[in-house]
Amino acid sequence: GQGNVDLRLLGRLDPQTQTLRQLQGLGNVTLKDAAIASPFLPDTPITDVNGQILADLNTLQVTHLSGKISGGDLAISGTLPLQNPLPITTQPLQLSLNNLAVDVPSLYQGALIGNVDITGTAIAPHIGGKLTLSNGNIFIGSASLPKPTSTSPTPNQGPQFRGLTLALSENIRVQNRPFLDFAAVGNLRLFGSVDHLQPQGQITLKGGQINLFASQLRL
């Protein structure tokens, strides 16, 4: 692939709080058939990436950025400020995921579609929208959410979930092998940070089995 980066970033780092201040950017990034490592799926790069990102002082603008990952398509468009929030009327950054076959070890394996809305700022994004899971397995009891590589945590920075909805659709099973295996439907809304998730909602277990070693209980 090809890429052209003409971008300048200016700002000030507070040595006591490790907080970026007065962050500004100017320039553009153009990508053609490029490949990008995914922070949440490090073994699954985003390929065939095409699009352009413009930086105009406090604002990052993505006119259209598309690519392929996990057998499906993604597209990004919209605006996201670097550090100072923009008016609510500004079109937020939106990530569209279509027909992904996701495989996150010890967490989830199955189909994924949906839209993710990204507001807030680039250094403190707020994540909303809706993702639908289907034809897959959710593994519980042995994993945590994958985290992007980062330095030491900084107060008031980093991603925050603001009502991101996870919808369990057709043929979803919740498993903790060899102890339990249930069919499940329902919705969860995620709030808080990756380290301190606050889920809200209801998941209904429709039927399955519990293995108590000496005996097996079917529901």
Image: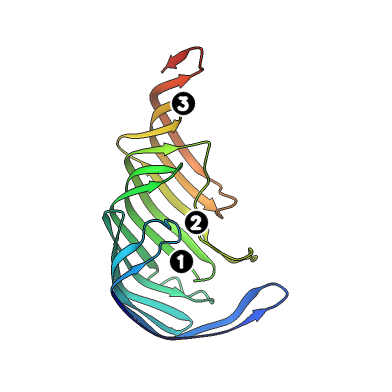
**Spatial CA span between label 2 and label 3:** 34 Å
Residue carrying label 3: 178
Which amino acid type is marked by label 1? Thr
Q: Is residue 196 above or below residue 149?
A: above
Q: Earlier in the sequence, mark 2 or mark 3?
A: 2
Q: Is residue 97 rendered to the left or right of residue 193?
A: left
Q: Secondary structure at mark 3?
A: loop
Where does residue 155 sit, x and y in percent of width and height?
A: 65, 65
| Picture coordinates of residue 180, whole percent (x, y) | 46, 26
Which image quarter: residue 187?
top left
Tags 3 and 1 touching, CB below 8 Å: no
Task: Determine the residue positioned at 51% across, 12% down.
Answer: 214
The residue that disc 2 covers is 162
Instruction: Name above or below for residue 14 compared with residue 103.
Output: below
Circle 1 is placed at which residue position?
119
The quadrant holding residue 20 is: bottom right
Mark 3–mark 1 distance (CA, rounded to whole Å): 41 Å
Q: Secondary structure at mark 1?
A: strand
Q: Horizontal and vertical percent for residue 211? A: 47, 19
User: Foreground residue, 102 or 201?
Assistant: 102
Circle 2 or circle 3, nearest the eye: 3
Percent coordinates x, y for residue 21 in the rendering: 61, 79
Residue 169 or 43: which is nearer the viewer? 43
Q: If the image is split into quadrants, where does the N terminus sit?
A: bottom left
Q: Are marks 1 and 2 in contact (CB under 8 Å)?
A: yes
Q: Secondary structure at mark 2?
A: strand
Binning the other alpha carbons within 10 Å of mark 3 as few (below 14), some (14 to 19) or many (20 upward) gives few
For image coordinates 29% across by 75% down, the residue present is: 51
